[in-house]
Image: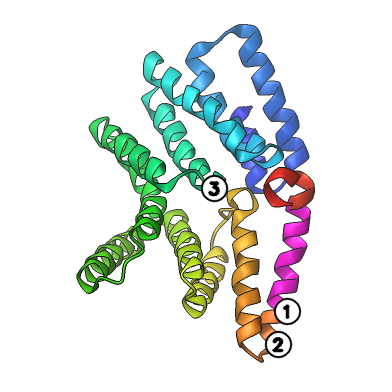
Amino acid sequence: LASCSYVLCEFQDFKGAEYIGGLSMGILEKLKAQEHLSQVYVCTFGGIFGWIRNSRLNLENILLGYQVGMQTGDIQHAMFNASSYINNSFISGLNLREVEKNIEKFGKEMIEYNQKAVYKSMLPVKRAVSDLILSTQDPLVMAQNSAEQNAFLQQVVEENNLVTLCDIYILGGIVAYIYGRYELAAALVQKRYELEKNMSRTSLYCGMTAFYDGLIFLAMARNSSEFEWSSKVSNVLSNVKIFEQIGKSNNE
């Protein structure tokens, strides 16, 4: 049930996701099935509750999902919770140094317990956090970061890992926007749009993706006379307004 709730979020059936998510939480509590807590928590607190509640309010329960998963031997779902904790920490605006510290901690455990797929899925946000922390114009550091990014991107493309590639474009676009590189940010959004045509679901990040798409297109509209960008702003705003009704604390 919890997994169904998570999937429904991806297809933007939030009412159905909330109902099924609440039902799965009720069953978990009634049966006192601690061995399933990690799986249920990552799909609910890392899913529908991330939409209808302030993202920061879910962090404690997602972390609990990780801890209980490790205690009960459900390593895979424990690591899913760890990855969700990192993503939600970033979305919530937690101190980047703290997020970086947790990325290193959980990353080592993912490698230690052979959870390579989960580890790779965390790498885009790891790179975004690193880029935002560095904030440097040192040519040597920039060259090293660029080489690492290109190597990781090439690996993801070769593996045809569309979800991770999509996350690279989303987070890379956000970083580019924050640094005022609007044309690069817009190019990454366009690449993502093309990629999403071949995907059954997209990475919404509880509305954050649409929010930054809007900011990027707005910046381009202000710097360009092309009507295309103003039209894109209007299209994105319609999605943002929908997401605002789902979870005002995150999208208002």
Q: What SS does tag 1 mark? A: helix
**What is the three-letter code of the residue carrying label 2?**
Phe
Residue 91's label in the rendered image is 3
Q: Main secondary structure of the magenta part?
A: helix
Q: Is residue 193 magenta?
A: no
Q: Residue at x 66, y 37 (%)?
A: 48
The vertical placement of 34 against 18, above or below, is above
The image's colour scheme reads rainbow
Q: Is residue 241 magenta?
A: yes
Q: What SS does tag 3 mark? A: helix
Mark closer to the observer (2, 3):
3
Quarter location, residue 136 = bottom left
Q: How far apart are the two marked residues, 1 and 3, measured between alpha carbons?
A: 27 Å
Q: What SS does tag 2 mark? A: helix
The answer to which of marks 1 and 3 sits earlier in the sequence is 3
| Tally of numbered tags | 3
Q: How far apart are the two marked residues, 2 and 3, measured between alpha carbons?
A: 31 Å
The vertical placement of 128 against 44, above or below, is below
The answer to which of marks 2 and 3 sits earlier in the sequence is 3
* Residue of label 2: 227
11 sits to left or right of 41: right
Mark closer to the observer (1, 3):
3
Q: Residues within 10 Å of mark 2 (few under 14, many from 20)?
A: few
Label 1 close to label 3 by CB (< 8 Å): no
Label 1 close to label 2 by CB (< 8 Å): yes
Quarter location, residue 159 = bottom left
Q: Residues within 10 Å of mark 1 (few under 14, many from 20)?
A: few
Q: Residues within 10 Å of mark 3 (few under 14, many from 20)?
A: some
The part of the chain drawn in magenta is 231-243
* Residue of label 1: 231
Residue 44: x %, y % from top left? 61, 31
49 sits to left or right of 191: right
